[in-house]
Image: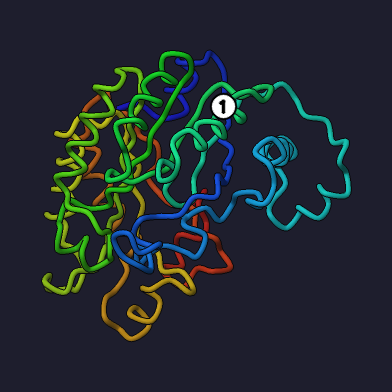
C-alpha cells in the first residue's frame, strides 16, 4: 500500500497541499430528488466544515485557502488573516478539493467552469471532487475524462458500507451495485482518473447484536472496495456531530461508537488485505471539535 503523501510526491515531485472549496452544490438525498435530510451522520455543511464561505468566488476561495495553509492558521485565526490581506503566499502546489455535498450533482457545464476557474489559479496542479456514485451522467463522465487528460483528477466516492440495510438506515439513498458500476465507468472515462472510496467503520445497524456493524461486515466493505478497483481508500470511524440525525439516536442509547482499541484492530485487519498498489488517503477523520459529541478520542488527530 502507498501513503497519500508519497503518492503525491511521486506524482508531482514535491509536497502537495489539498485545499477545500465550496461549489455551492447540494445532494439528491437532501433536495428531495431521492430523499430528504441527507445522510444521518452528515453535518449541516455536508462534511465541508473547513471550507471558505460559498458566497465568495472560486478565485477568492482559493486565495483564502492557500493563505490559511501557508500561514498554518487554525480556524480561530481567520480574523487575524482577514486583517492582513497582504500576507505573502509561498510557491506551494495545491490540489483543489471541492468537498462538501455532492460536487458532480448539478449543471455539468456550470460545475466544469468552477473547476476550471480553480485550476487556473497559480500553484494549483490538480482537482479533487467529493461525490456519490449515483451522480455521474454521461456528460459528466465525458467532462471528467477530458479534464483527466490535461490535469490530475481525483474523484472521491462516499460509499461508507457495502451493506445496503445499513445504508438505508443512515439514508444513503442508493444501492451498493451502483458504486461498482460507477468505479468502472470512471475508469472507462479515463484511466487517469484517480478514484478514492470513503468507508466509515462503526455505522449503526439494528440487525447486528451491538447495534453497529460487526468486524466481519466492516472488513467485507473493504474487500468490496478492493474488488471494485478503487485506486485509493479513505477510512474513518463514525463520529457523532451536533445537529446531525444521529445525534438524538446516539444520545438515546440506540447504538455505541467504536472504542479506540476496537478501531485500531479494524484498521490493522484492513491493512492486512489492502493491496500494495492501493493508496491510503486516510485512516482517521478530522471532525469539527466544537461539534463533536462522540467518540472523544478522535479529537487529537496526531495521537490517533
Q: Quadrant of residue 114?
A: top right
Q: Is residue 113 above or below residue 255?
A: above
Is 234 positioned to the left or the right of 162 in the image?
right
The answer to which of 92 and 166 lies nearer the viewer is: 166
Q: Residue at image x 29%, y 17%?
A: 191
Q: Quadrant of residue 271?
A: top left
The answer to which of 283 and 226 lies nearer the viewer is: 226
Q: Residue at image x 40%, y 76%?
A: 247
Give the residue pinned by disc 1: 116
Is 291 positioned to the left or the right of 255 in the image?
right
Residue 142 at x, y = what percent? Answer: 35, 24
Q: Is residue 215 above or below residue 62?
A: below
* Mark 1 element type: helix
Q: Residue at image x 20%, y 29%?
A: 184
Q: Is residue 12 above or below residue 167?
A: above
Q: Residue at image x 42%, y 48%?
A: 102
Q: Is residue 110 above or below residue 25?
A: above
Residue 47 at x, y = what percent? Answer: 47, 55
Residue 294 at x, y = what percent? Answer: 42, 70
Q: How many marks?
A: 1
The answer to which of 237 and 50 lies nearer the viewer is: 50
Q: Quadrant of residue 170?
A: bottom left
Farthest residue, direction bottom: 252
Residue 190 at x, y = what percent? Answer: 31, 19
The answer to which of 56 and 39 lies nearer the viewer is: 56
Quadrant of the drawing holding the N terminus:
top left
Amino acid at each position: 500500500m502507498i501513503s497519500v503523501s508519497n503518492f503525491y510526491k511521486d506524482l508531482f515531485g514535491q509536497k502537495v497541499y489539498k485545499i477545500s472549496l465550496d461549489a455551492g452544490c447540494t445532494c439528491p438525498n437532501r433536495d428531495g430528488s431521492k430523499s430528504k435530510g441527507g445522510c444521518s451522520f452528515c453535518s449541516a455543511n455536508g462534511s465541508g466544515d473547513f471550507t471558505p464561505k460559498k458566497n465568495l468566488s472560486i478565485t477568492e476561495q482559493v486565495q483564502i485557502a492557500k493563505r490559511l495553509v501557508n500561514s498554518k492558521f487554525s480556524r480561530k485565526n481567520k480574523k487575524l488573516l482577514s486583517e492582513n490581506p497582504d500576507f505573502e503566499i509561498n510557491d506551494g502546489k495545491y490540489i483543489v478539493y471541492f468537498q462538501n455535498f455532492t460536487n458532480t450533482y448539478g449543471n455539468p457545464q456550470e460545475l466544469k467552469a468552477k473547476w476550471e476557474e480553480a485550476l487556473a489559479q497559480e500553484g494549483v496542479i490538480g482537482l479533487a471532487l467529493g461525490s456519490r456514485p449515483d451522480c455521474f451522467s454521461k456528460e459528466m463522465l465525458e467532462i471528467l475524462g477530458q479534464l483527466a487528460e490535461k490535469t490530475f483528477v481525483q474523484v472521491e466516492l462516499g460509499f461508507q458500507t457495502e451493506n445496503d440495510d445499513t445504508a438505508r438506515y443512515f439514508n444513503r439513498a442508493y444501492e451498493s451495485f451502483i458504486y461498482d458500476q460507477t468505479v468502472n465507468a470512471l475508469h472507462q472515462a479515463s484511466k487517469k482518473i484517480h478514484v478514492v472510496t470513503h468507508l466509515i467503520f462503526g455505522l449503526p445497524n439494528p440487525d447486528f447484536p451491538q447495534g453497529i456493524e460487526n468486524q466481519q461486515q466492516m472488513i467485507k466493505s473493504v474487500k468490496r472496495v478492493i474488488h471494485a478497483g478503487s485506486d485509493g481508500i479513505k477510512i474513518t470511524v463514525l463520529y457523532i456531530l451536533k445537529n446531525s440525525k444521529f445525534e438524538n439516536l446516539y444520545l438515546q442509547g440506540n447504538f455505541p461508537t467504536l472504542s479506540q482499541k476496537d478501531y485500531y484492530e479494524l484498521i490493522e485487519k484492513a491493512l492486512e488485505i489492502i493491496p500494495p498498489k492501493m493508496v491510503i488517503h486516510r485512516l482517521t477523520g478530522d471532525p469539527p471539535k466544537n461539534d463533536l459529541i462522540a467518540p472523544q478520542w478522535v479529537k487529537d488527530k496526531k495521537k490517533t
